[in-house]
Each structure stands twice: as structure tokens, then as C-alpha cells.
Image: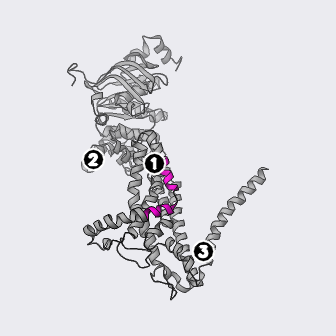
């Protein structure tokens, strides 16, 4: 009985690995035409011309990386700040309730975030935020108008809102796992509350926090629906963050139904392959960091 | 200075009571620590030794639900009137298990309290770090590896590192909560020598489970039992001629 159970679970475990390998293989196999036609330059050209069947993925790669990076820039300080508050300053019942609610936020379907993006965030961006940025920072190419509402920055903002729960949930947990003795050691030196956080807690928890950031990045890179709804879907790279853009996930969602030729299909699947590889790498780094989360044990 | 006790230096604890939640763990203790003396607090587990010294630097109150009553005077001033942060810069503490900050180097561990006081890195900080490591009898062992993590040291070295860290901010008083309980006999002997040397400059209150240690390092000894002070007096007298039967039973190993 025991042996049967072991064999069975072993097979299931293998099946998971096989599934991942199969996905990679199928993505590869179904994109060979595109690989042959464009080679590695597929990743560095920004032409996207379905009529002439001339394709390059740079716009999408750029859009994916820039929106994810911006989202992290916005979400990391907020996420960590909220986590510090919940772990260290908030009364315990409040911390528990908030942590629960924040975990719920992570479970909201992304299409709902997309809807909120379209109907709430886009108007605010168009009427208030973007005109403000154009007026005061418009001399920088990054903030050149016009104010469409939609665009890279808006997509990044929606993404940021979506990934804050990941950062906060994990960071709160690693902060709460900092040994009381470490906090007391800082306190006994005459550290204020904030100094205890800065001196004893954040450094102790740093790898856990880094892991949470990478997990959030993984989520941001692959997020499809919400981004597709607010990014503007333009196949040209523009310097301005206020301009419309495109991401790898968004182009897959938008164009797979229109891909009428074999090469077009293969091209889209190659975009998918590239996204697959990028997210695997990012998540791999996250796992590595989280796995090494334990700091050198004290004594 | 408290006007009522113009000449009172050192620590005076007056009728100190302490609670964890509804549970009273100290039932009104009074004792006096003279400046530049070492007072050892002995007693069986759970007798309130640690709680008592944690009242002295107001670390007791950081535990949720914990509170205290009574008066503790430090050089005549009521500690409850102090900002706890400022108080703890005058009353350093060394814990049972060495607690170096694991992500900091040896140097940065010693400098951590100085940085809290706003001192910038520079020759002055280098000098204080070196002095503190000398004072903690650790300098010769680490002077070439100051950039290595504090956790790379042995347990006994880590504890001396923590003592150096406490000394760096130039406190008046050092509280030690069973500082040798996690150490081997050789490391323990080094810490005891160190306590003996530190007595010249600091007032020290040490909690210990080890009666021999109390006998070796302290000038006065206090025997606590179940949250009460049973006996307090010169160490030589407590160990050779205790006034109470319970003290005698405890130090002769009949219970505890």
C-alpha cells in the first residue's frame, strides 16, 4: 500500500515537471517559422506589420519591462511601508484584519482591476495627473503630452495597485518573524521605534523582502487583462510614459484571434515563448532568494 | 537630581511591582545599587530576576500587556520621567543569548549605537570602536577582521562584541541578563574577568543562575524568590553567612 502510494505521488510529481517541459516545448515548436524568418533580431526590432508579415517584438518587450519596472518603483515603497505599519505599529487586531483584507485584494480577478483602471484611474490620469506632469515635467521627453489618460504610466499604476498586496503580505510576515531579541537588542541601545525597524528588522528581513519584490515582478510581467485594458495598444515605442504602448501579454490577448497566417501565429507564440522565459527567470530568482531567506543564525 | 535625595547616586529601586497582564511577578522590591559596584541577582527560574533588571531600563514595558509600579531612581532621577529612548542610552543591556546584528560587520555592530546618537563615520568613530573593543577584551582577536560579519565570531566573542556595542555609547550602568548562560566555561571566564575590569568605570547589575559566578564577580548579591527580595547584602556575607534559611538552602543547592 505504502509503495503504491509512493509510486502514485511520484508519478504526479513527474507529471508537473513534464507539463512545464511540454509547455516550453510546444511554445518552441509552434514558433519555429518565426524563429527561422527573423532569427534573434526578432527581439530587437520594433516593426509590427501583419500585412507585410514583418514582425519584431521590441515594442512589447519594452512595454512589458518598462511598465513592470515602473509598477515596482511605485509599489515597493508603499507595499513595504504598509507592511512596516501592520507588523510593528498597528494594534494587533487591526493588523490581522488589514492583512486579511490585503490578501483578499490579491484574489480579485484582474479584469476587475482593468475595469477600475478604465473607469476610475484613466479619467483621473487624463484630467488631473497627466496635465500636471506635462505642465511641470513636460520639458523631459518622459513626460511629453498629450494627455490620453491611457498609456504606459497608467498601466504601471494599475499594475502597482495589483502587486502591492503581494509585497505587503510577504513583507509583513517576514518582519513579524524577526526575533524579539533582535528588536530588543536595538531598543536597549536606545533605538526609537523607527530606528528599530531600520536597524534590526529591515536588514534581518531583507532577503524575504527582496523575494516578495521578485514575486510581485513576476506577477507584473505576466499580467494581461488589466494592462491590455489601459495601456493603449500602440505598436510604436515612444519616449513619453504618457504615450500608449503595448506589452507582450497584451499583444497575445489582442491579436491571437486575428492571426490568419501560420507565420503570424508562430510570431505571436514566439512572443509568448519570450515572455515565458523572462517570467521563469524572474520567478527562479525569487525562489532562490526566498529559499536563502534565513540570515546567518545568531550564535 | 531629585531634591529629596540630593546625594543619591547609583540606582535605587523602591517598592517595585511588575505585571505581565494580570499576573503580578514582582511584589514590591526595594534595593540599592551603589555606583561602580557589581550587584548580582540570583534566584530560581521564574523568580523575577530578569523582569527586575528589565524594569531598570524600562524594557519591561515594551512587552505587550506588561506594566510596573513603584519608583526607580537613577542618580536620583525617576526613570519613569525619562524618555525611555534616552534612558536606554544611559543604561546599556547585554542579553542571555548574544544578539549581534547579523547583517552588520563587527565594526558596524559596535558603531550601531553611536550612529543612533548621530555620530558620523570618521576618525572619532574609529577611535571609539577601537576603545570599546579594547574595553570588551576583544580587540586583539578581531582587529584584522573588523569588516567580517559579527555572526562569524564564536559565541563568547559575540557576547563580548555585544558588550563592546553596549560600552560604545558610554552608558553609566550596564545590565547583564545571564550573559554567560549560552557560553562554555572558557568564554565564561573571559566575560567574568571583563566584568571585574569594567567595574572600575561602570555600575553593573548582573542576573545569573550560576552561584559561583555571583560569588566571583559581585560586590553585593540579591536573592530573589517568587517575586520577592529574600535577602540583599555583601556577597561575602550572603555566601558565607546568609541571614535567611531559604537563601542558605538555595545557595547550598537544596532547591532551585
Q: State the residue position of label 1.
A: A172
Reply above or below: A160 against A273: above
- Chain ID of residue with mark 1: A
Label 1 to label 3: alpha-carbon separation? 37 Å
Residue A289 point in image, percent of width and height: 50, 57
Q: Residues within 10 Å of mark 3 (few under 14, many from 20)?
A: many
| Colouring style | one colour
Decide which of tag 1 and tag 3 comes sooner along the chain. 3
Residue A233 position by quadrant: bottom left
What secondary structure is found at the residue carrying circle 2? helix
- Chain ID of residue with mark 3: A
Does residue A272 appear in the picture of this structure?
Answer: yes
Q: Residues within 10 Å of mark 1 (few under 14, many from 20)?
A: many
Q: Which mark is residue B125?
A: 2
Seen as rendered, the residue at the extreme bottom is: A52
Residue shown at 55%/78% (left/top)?
A268
Residue shown at 46%/54% (left/top)?
A165
Residue B5 position by quadrant: top left
Our reading of the magenta stretch's main secondary structure is helix
Q: State the residue position of label 3.
A: A27
Label 3 to label 2: alpha-carbon separation? 59 Å
Residue A216 versus residue A118: which sits nearer the camera? A118
Magenta stretch?
Answer: A100-117
B152 in the magenta segment: no
- Report the mark closest to the observer, 3 or 2: 3
Amino acid at each position: 500500500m505504502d509503495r503504491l502510494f509512493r509510486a502514485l505521488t511520484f508519478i504526479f510529481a513527474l507529471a508537473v515537471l513534464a507539463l512545464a517541459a511540454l509547455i516550453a516545448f510546444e511554445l518552441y515548436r509552434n514558433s519555429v517559422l518565426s524563429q527561422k524568418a527573423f532569427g534573434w533580431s526578432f527581439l530587437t526590432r520594433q516593426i509590427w506589420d501583419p500585412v507585410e508579415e514583418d514582425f519584431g517584438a521590441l515594442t512589447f518587450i519594452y512595454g512589458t519591462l518598462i511598465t513592470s519596472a515602473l509598477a515596482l518603483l511605485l509599489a515597493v515603497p508603499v507595499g513595504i511601508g504598509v507592511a512596516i505599519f501592520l507588523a510593528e505599529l498597528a494594534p494587533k487586531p487591526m493588523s490581522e484584519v488589514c492583512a486579511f483584507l490585503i490578501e483578499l485584494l490579491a484574489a480579485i480577478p484582474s479584469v476587475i482591476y482593468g475595469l477600475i483602471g478604465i473607469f476610475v484611474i484613466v479619467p483621473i490620469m487624463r484630467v488631473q495627473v497627466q496635465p500636471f506632469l506635462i505642465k511641470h515635467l513636460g520639458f523631459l521627453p518622459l513626460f511629453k503630452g498629450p494627455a490620453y489618460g491611457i498609456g504606459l504610466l497608467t498601466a504601471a499604476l494599475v499594475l502597482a495597485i495589483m502587486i502591492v498586496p503581494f509585497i505587503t503580505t510577504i513583507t509583513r510576515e517576514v518582519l513579524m518573524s524577526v526575533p524579539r531579541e533582535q528588536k530588543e537588542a536595538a531598543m536597549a541601545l536606545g533605538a526609537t521605534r523607527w530606528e528599530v525597524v531600520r536597524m534590526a528588522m529591515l536588514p534581518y528581513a531583507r532577503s524575504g523582502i527582496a523575494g516578495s519584490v521578485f514575486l510581485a515582478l513576476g506577477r507584473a510581467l505576466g499580467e494581461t487583462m488589466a494592462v491590455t485594458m489601459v495601456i493603449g495598444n500602440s505598436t510604436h515605442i515612444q519616449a513619453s510614459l504618457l504615450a500608449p504602448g503595448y506589452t507582450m501579454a497584451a499583444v497575445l490577448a489582442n491579436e491571437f484571434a486575428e492571426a490568419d497566417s501560420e507565420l503570424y501565429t508562430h510570431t505571436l507564440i514566439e512572443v509568448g515563448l519570450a515572455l515565458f522565459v523572462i517570467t521563469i527567470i524572474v520567478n527562479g530568482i525569487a525562489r532562490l532568494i526566498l529559499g536563502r531567506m534565513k540570515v546567518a543564525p545568531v550564535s | 537630581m531629585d531634591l529629596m535625595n540630593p546625594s543619591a547616586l547609583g540606582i535605587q529601586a523602591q517598592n517595585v511591582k511588575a505585571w505581565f497582564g494580570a499576573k503580578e511577578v514582582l511584589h514590591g522590591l526595594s534595593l540599592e545599587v551603589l555606583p561602580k559596584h557589581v550587584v548580582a541577582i540570583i534566584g530560581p527560574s521564574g523568580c523575577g530576576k530578569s523582569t527586575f533588571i528589565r524594569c531598570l531600563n524600562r524594557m519591561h514595558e515594551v512587552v505587550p500587556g506588561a506594566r510596573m509600579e513603584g519608583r526607580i531612581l537613577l542618580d536620583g532621577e525617576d526613570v519613569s520621567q525619562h524618555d525611555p529612548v534616552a534612558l536606554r542610552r544611559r543604561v546599556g543591556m547585554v542579553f542571555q543569548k548574544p544578539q549581534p546584528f547579523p547583517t552588520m560587520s563587527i565594526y558596524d555592530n559596535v558603531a550601531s549605537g553611536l550612529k543612533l546618537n548621530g555620530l558620523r563615520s570618521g576618525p572619532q568613530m574609529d577611535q571609539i570602536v577601537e576603545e570599546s573593543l579594547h574595553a570588551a577584551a576583544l580587540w586583539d582577536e578581531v582587529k584584522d577582521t573588523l569588516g567580517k560579519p559579527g555572526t562569524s565570531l564564536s559565541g563568547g566573542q559575540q557576547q563580548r562584541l555585544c558588550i563592546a556595542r553596549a560600552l560604545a555609547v558610554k552608558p553609566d550602568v550596564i545590565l547583564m541578563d545571564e550573559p554567560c548562560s549560552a557560553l562554555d566555561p572558557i568564554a565564561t571566564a573571559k566575560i567574568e574577568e571583563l566584568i571585574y575590569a569594567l567595574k572600575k568605570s561602570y555600575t553593573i547589575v548582573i542576573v545569573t543562575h550560576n552561584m559561583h559566578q555571583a560569588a566571583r564577580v559581585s560586590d553585593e548579591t540579591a536573592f530573589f524568590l517568587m517575586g520577592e527580595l529574600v535577602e540583599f547584602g555583601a556577597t561575602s556575607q550572603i555566601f558565607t553567612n546568609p541571614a535567611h534559611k531559604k537563601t542558605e538552602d538555595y545557595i547550598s543547592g537544596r532547591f532551585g
